[in-house]
Amino acid sequence: MNMKKQQQQEPEKMTNQNVVVSDAKTSMKVAVAMAMSNPSLFSPAVPKPPASSAGRFIRRKPVKKLETQGGPTKINAWVDSMRASSPAKSPPSSPEHDSWMMTHPSALEMFDEITKASKGKKMVMFLDYDGTLSPIVQDPDRAFMSDEMRAAVKAVARYFPTAIVSGRGKDKVHDFVKLKELYYAGSHGMDIEGPAHGTNDKSVVCQPASEFLPMINQVYKKLVVKTQFIEGAKVESNKFCLSVHFRCVEEKKWPELVELVKEVLSDYPKLKMNYGRKVLEIKPTIKWDKGKALEYLLEALGYANSKDVLPIYIGDDKTDEDAFKVLRKRKQGFGILVSKFPKETSAAYTLQDPSEVMCFLQRMVEWKQVSQRGYYRT
């Protein structure tokens, strides 16, 4: 990387990036205006939401977003989508997997190419949480990251601006990660906050869906009541969006669960439902997603239209595809999909699981440390 002599002598701290963000308040406003047609939606202080209550690979054509209205045909289409979103339980055929890996090679194997592309550029790291930094577990409240992974993320943040971009509520994912020097974009990027300079200061605050909070809270309460008799179903409040987990629900009960969720949402046309890995996601209909969050944070860091930045986004879920597509459209940076199994993706590279993610992060730190001394051994 093209770094000043002083930077070669001293690791870049996230606090240095805080200064950039803090001094770039005007540019942050421009970013919001560019991404949202209604900047009045941004609010630095919003009441807390209610507390959380507590496959086989199938090749399919991409399933389009389905409306929450409709009869049995729509329900069946949703169940098919839910089934297809589940990760495979056994490895796919070797020829199929090998073919997929030819077009989506391992980020570990292509590590040198990734670092070569960073020459003269500032790298910025974006990380999903569930399935990326922590394993997918039966109980979403117990998706803890290991101490070793936390140390790897902390080390990465010493050298590169680092953000956690998750569908979880911002406060909840912060409680899991426990690192104050990071940027956190919760609720699929609808609740963004950066590291604080001081006790009462937040360098970045972005909440484009704040006006939907009362509606989200109403729907949360109704869904808890409606789904209480479906064994294994769990409704999770993520502040500006909701998750209905069906990982522990018998497949024969999926149509009933979808019907109940659709019934509640029929009274709320400003909310939409999508699916993820064994989860139904309910979000406001505003044009905001993880890709928009990535663009907003790059703008806040002063890299909106810069050619001197290389964003790297690592994620495992369908919602991460919005960020992968942004990077492809910008022709800048790399998306890395975390998956052992072939699936359609806009990511350039792959990693198999959180253990490989940790290995990649550790190699990034090692490469940065030794490159500052003027050499790097593969």
Image (cartoon, rainbow, N blue to C red):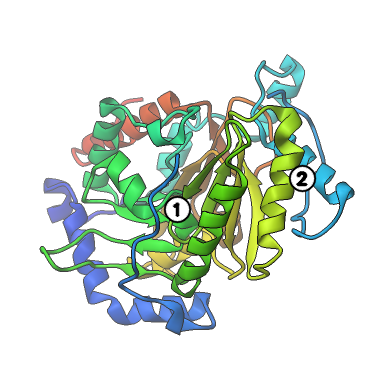
Compared across the picture, whether 326 is left or right of 33 comes to right
Rendered image: mark on residue 238 = 1
| Element at label 2 | helix
The residue positioned 69% from the left and 35% from the top of the image is 343
Residue 302 visible in image: no
Q: Position of residue 137 (x, y in %)?
A: 48, 27
Give the quadrant of the C terminus: top left
**Position in image of residue 91 (x %, y %):** 67, 16
Q: Quadrant of residue 370?
A: top left
Residue at 54 percent of width and 60 percent of height: 289
Q: Using the image as rendered, state which of residue 250 and residue 58 is in the foreground.
A: 250
Q: Secondary structure at mark 1?
A: loop
Q: Residue at x 34, y 67 (%)?
A: 47
Three-letter code for the amino acid on which mark 2 is drawn: Trp
The residue under label 2 is 78
Location of residue 66 in the rendering, given as x and y in whole percent from the top left corner: 77, 55
**Mark 1 belongs to which amino acid?**
Asn
Numbered circles on residues, count: 2
Q: CA distance from mark 1 to mark 2?
A: 22 Å
Apparent side of residue 248 relative to residue 14 in the rendered image (left or right): right
Classify 10 Å Cα crowding around label 2: few (below 14), some (14-19), many (20 and above): many
Q: Nearer the viewer, residue 25 or 84?
A: 84
At x 66%, y 55%, the residue is: 273
Estimate the x, y position of residue 361 in percent, counting from the top left.
35, 34
Query: Which labelled disc corresponds to residue 24?
Result: none
